[in-house]
Amino acid sequence: MVRVAVAGASGYAGAEVLRLLLGHPDVEVGALTAASSAGTPLGQHAPHLLPLADRVLEPTSAEVLAGHDVVVLALPHGSSGPLAAELGDEVLVVDAAADHRLADAAAWEAFYGSPHAGTWPYALPELPLAGGGRQRDALVGARRLAVPGCYPTACTLALAPGMAAGLCEADDVVVVAASGTSGAGRAAKVTMLGAEVMGSMSPYGVGGVHRHTPEVEQGLAAAAGEPVRASFTPTLAPMPRGILATATARTQPGTTAAQVRAAWQDAYADEAFVHVLPEGRWPRTKDVAGSNAVHLQVALDERVGRVVAVAAVDNLVKGTAGAAVQGLNIALGLPEGAGLSAVGLAP
Ligand SMILES: NC(=O)C1=CN([C@@H]2O[C@H](COP(=O)(O)OP(=O)(O)OC[C@H]3O[C@@H](n4cnc5c(N)ncnc54)[C@H](OP(=O)(O)O)[C@@H]3O)[C@@H](O)[C@H]2O)C=CC1
Ligand SMILES: CC(=O)N[C@@H](CCC(=O)OP(=O)(O)O)C(=O)O
């Protein structure tokens, strides 16, 4: 059995990792840590995780996290760099925070306003790379994994096939995405109160300032083989989970609808979790809720010469915890889908 510790177990992402690990045939749950909640039982924060309800949360430290095969860090960004450095090279550390996702230190500093902690293999296995191959190849045997952000997972997978096939131009990408409120974590914020959120949708981080912008550009550039410029606008939707990303890109002159359809279908034909829907059906967040699936659809708007791709993911599963589990499976040589399901929870 693989022994897995989870840091940040009282948060949304940490609890979702635990929900998945409880269904994983090869995993035994080890230490559970938190910050202000240390000393309290997990059941007080995540009553749905019944088998672990009596487990008492410990403080987050390298000593508590030592002696495991895998440590999943589900902490606010900024915490994982120093902690991972104390954990040793042999343990597999899976970081759900943003700290190790970006390769460009200047982009990190511009968008996060803090020193760059370093770059780890980016755990988006299905990402098709320019010139062939998948991002999966970089994860096999890794001892450090950076879990992609929830928005970048949806946005990158939505447009990567067109970039990899050379059908989309790299300098004209526009993405608007809606997220459920769990994307913001469970720390109290006035903007997340039910009275503010219910029955309303609102944009935020408008004007190219959201910190996921460079991550979306980085993922699409890996598929395109050249730098990508993207305009990214997030919006908050009155739902607990889910992301619906609508991504558009200018197409190369002469691109046909048949070429577009073939590129998207071919890119994900062998992927268990990324599903291009039959023509005429469009992704819905409910259909992927609770699952590690990505639902995708694409159309060519011939009038304006743009491809329009729509992706739905559950931000807490494929957008965080499912990616963490899928990544650790690949790194350790376990079946990639162990502990994961592609079946959603609609209606
Ligand atoms: N929510 C989502 O959809 C996604 C989240 N992520 C990332 O996952 C990470 C966790 O997010 P999320 O679960 O939503 O956040 P939450 O606010 O829900 O949980 C944060 C967790 O970290 C703990 N914590 C807070 N501060 C510290 C600290 N200084 N040292 C140690 N532990 C600390 C909290 O403990 P306590 O309760 O005791 O304070 C809690 O367990 C973040 O980096 C986030 O960006 C990534 C993709 C999607
Ligand atoms: C709805 C909402 O607020 N979502 C969060 C992003 C989700 C996330 O956790 O992203 P990181 O892992 O990169 O921090 C936000 O926009 O900041």
Image: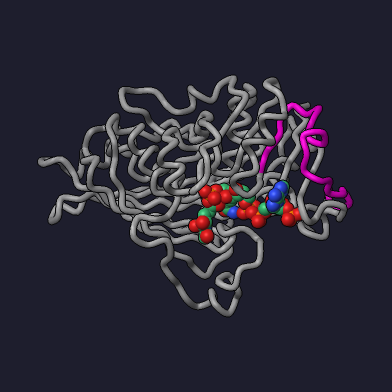
Residue drawn at (51%, 41%) of the image: 148
Between 44 and 84, the residue placed more toward the observer is 84
Give the color scheme: rainbow, by chain, secondary structure or one colour.
one colour
State the image coordinates of residue 168 (x, y, percent, origin top left). Answer: 22, 40
Between 33 and 13, the residue placed more toward the observer is 33
Q: Is residue 68 visible?
A: yes
Q: Is residue 109 left or right of residue 32?
A: left
203 vs 45: above or below: below
Residue 224: image quadrant is: top left
State the image coordinates of residue 116 (x, y, percent, origin top left). Answer: 51, 37
Q: Which residues are magenta?
A: 52-73
Residue 105: image quadrant is: top left
Q: Is residue 115 left or right of residue 172?
A: right
Residue drawn at (77%, 59%) of the image: 45
Q: Quadrant of the N terminus?
A: top right
Q: Is residue 287 visible?
A: no
Residue drawn at (77%, 43%) of the image: 60
Residue drawn at (50%, 78%) of the image: 199
State the image coordinates of residue 136 (x, y, percent, origin top left). Answer: 49, 27
Between 22 and 117, the residue placed more toward the observer is 117
Q: Quadrant of the C terminus?
A: bottom right
State the image coordinates of residue 289 (x, y, percent, origin top left). Answer: 56, 55
Please give the count of numbered marks on the rendered protein. Answer: 0
Name the residue at the left extreme: 254
Check if residue 66 falls in the magenta segment.
Answer: yes
293 vs 196: above or below: above
Check if residue 151 falls in the magenta segment.
Answer: no
Residue 32: image quadrant is: top right
